[in-house]
Image (tube, helix red, strand yellow):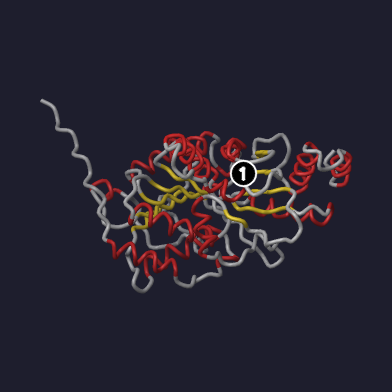
Amino acid sequence: MHSSPLLPPPPLDVARDTVQACLAALAAAPALPLRQVSPRRALGAMAGSLQTGPGAANAIRVVRAEVTHRHDDAWNVTASASAWPLRYGADKPLLYLCRPASVQALSGVLVDARERGIVCSDAETQSSRWPKGVQPALPAWLAAQHNCMPFDPATGEEVRAILRAALETLYVEQQPGYYYLAIHDEGADADADEYAVAAPLSPADAAAASLGMYRVSPPDPAPCRVRLCGAGTMLAVVADAARLLQEDWDIAAQVWSCPSYTRLARDAQAAEQWNLCHPRAIPRLAHVRRCLDDSAAPVIAVTGYGQHIAGQIGGHVRGRFIAVGADAMMEVSAPWLAVTALKALADDGALPLQFVEYALRRYALV
């Protein structure tokens, strides 16, 4: 005698008005000035409004794996201790707040959530010997999971844009899978660089952020000589490097926020595949190419994870490309990134090598 296998869970059938209530709540004026708070604090404010706000109360199921609360914790929202009911069907979107530091720990979360919903991890807010608080295998594993869309937002406004896109994709368009957001707790202050303390995102920039990248530096009449891309906490470092290049070397640099190098790479691969299979059709242009194809200036892509995460877009970028990550031999700092940019320009013959040597001494890097 043997037991019958468990029946598969019923299809996720989310009432459209419930999702629209969530989207409307996220579109409303924030309780916190998101341009001046960390993604973690911003996410806590958004989760609270989704749980209790007018018209959106209980429109989303918020699950918090870490149930121990601190009085000053931005994630002190009304939450369930488990997503167990989701295994037997659900009628609401899921926002899962957790802190997995390994693939094994994240796998447990995904079993709980049936690999469905919006998974937000603040692992990098904890002391750890690993970059961004997670074992190196975890970001590589996420990038390889085609039912996962991983993001590393830099600001509260990016979090809002990604949450809205995730709700649209998962619960309006009914696409399978889940979104994963790495949430840091480093907020901007009054003296922060203008790029790090960006104005609220325009609708176009919000849409571009959800596709993987958007430009954050203002238009400049000077020709761009290098493009600097940063994700998560690295955006502020990249913006500081752009300032050094301008002030110390009179070199104009574009700054791009790249919340998801993985999404950019997948979109580029899909466009290439489609163009190959439809040779007579108008070619599709990947988002990363729409952003960067207007120039052959060097591109330096920076991530707080291993450099292979940023390196995913290298084959789809026009001009010299350099990926920088936490596993680089050098420290990921603004002076080192400025030197890296100078070296890229020198390698392209756009600057004498003496500039690089002088910069190394000026910033006391050798």
Query: Compared with residue 329, is residue 17 higher up or lower down, i.e. above or below?
Result: below
**Between 234 and 83, the one nearer to me in the picture:** 234
Q: Position of residue 222 (x, y in %)?
A: 76, 58
**Between 333 and 277, the one nearer to me in the picture:** 277
The answer to whether 325 appears left or right of 15 in the picture is right
Q: Quadrant of the N terminus?
A: top left
**Between 64 and 68, the one nearer to me in the picture:** 64
Q: Which residue is mark 1?
A: 303
Q: Secondary structure at mark 1?
A: loop
Q: Quadrant of residue 26?
A: bottom left
Q: Quadrant of the C terminus?
A: top right
The residue that appears at 64% across and 44% down in the rendered structure is: 302
Residue furthest out toward the top = 1
What amino acid type is highlighted by mark number 1?
A: Thr
Counting other residues with Cα less than 10 Å from the Cα at mark 1, is it few (<14), some (14-19), or many (20 or more)? many
Q: Position of residue 140 (x, y in %)?
A: 51, 35
Q: Position of residue 177 (x, y in %)?
A: 36, 45
The residue that appears at 72% across and 48% down in the rendered structure is: 226
The answer to whether 174 appears left or right of 350 in the picture is left
The answer to whether 328 appears left or right of 166 in the picture is right
**Between 74 and 136, the one nearer to me in the picture:** 136
Query: Compared with residue 189, is residue 338 higher up or lower down, i.e. above or below?
Result: above
